[in-house]
Image (cartoon, rainbow, N blue to C red):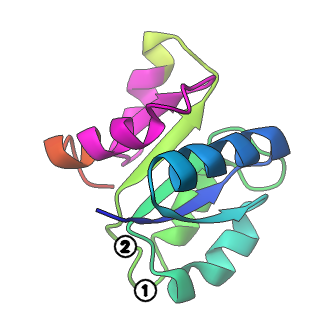
Amino acid sequence: MKLRILQVEDDPDILEISRVALELVGGHEVFQFAEGREAIRNAAEIAPDVILLDVMMPGMTGEETLAGLRKVRDCETTPAFFMTARATSGDHDELMHRGVLGVLHKPFDPMTLSEQIAGALRDGRGRG
């Protein structure tokens, strides 16, 4: 199933790798932004099926961006994922309590990123 994915990530290299992983490998449509405010401004028009957010970004953090997106029409319950390089189980558990469906760890495997997202959506591990 082709998904409309809204991604917010400040690292241009991660954005490019994600685009390849999600569009070319996964067959999805990806809308990428380098900062949260721009993503929030465009979210209603995009009406994403999935939201991917970097946790640590300058300006608005991933958590602040998610809070802003939750106020946008059609994004109130959109499944969301945090992407992070923080790898401890305590960090993972803390992020899961922020209302996301999952936490994806960086670096990620571009060949399996789409399947990780699809698997979490199928499992319904929680709604954001």
| Residue holding disc 1 | 73
Quarter of the image where one finds residue 18: top right
Image side of residue 5 versus residue 125, left or right: right
Q: Residues within 10 Å of mark 1 (few under 14, many from 20)?
A: few
Q: Is residue 117 above or below residue 36?
A: above
Image quarter (top left, top right, bottom left or bottom right) of the C terminus: bottom left
Provide residue 79's location: percent of width, then percent of height.
34, 57
Name the residue at 43% across, 86% down.
73
Q: At x 55% / y 14%, what residue is drawn?
A: 87
In the image, residue 37 above or below residue 83: below
Depth check: give the residue in front, 127 or 31: 31
Disc number placed over residue 125 in the picture, else none:
none
What kind of residue is marked 2?
Glu
Residue 14 in view here:
yes
Q: Quadrant of residue 114?
A: top left
| Residue 57 screen position, x and y as percent | 77, 44
CB atoms at circles 2 and 1 under 8 Å apart? yes
Secondary structure, mark 1, is loop
**Amino acid at dot 1:** Arg
| Residue visible at 74% across and 47% down in the picture | 16
Which quarter shows the N terminus?
bottom left
Numbered badge on residue 76: 2
Badge 2: residue crowd in 10 Å (few <14, some 14–19, many ≥20): some
Task: Please name the residue shown 55% across and 56% down the image.
Answer: 23
Give the magenta range.
Answer: 92-119
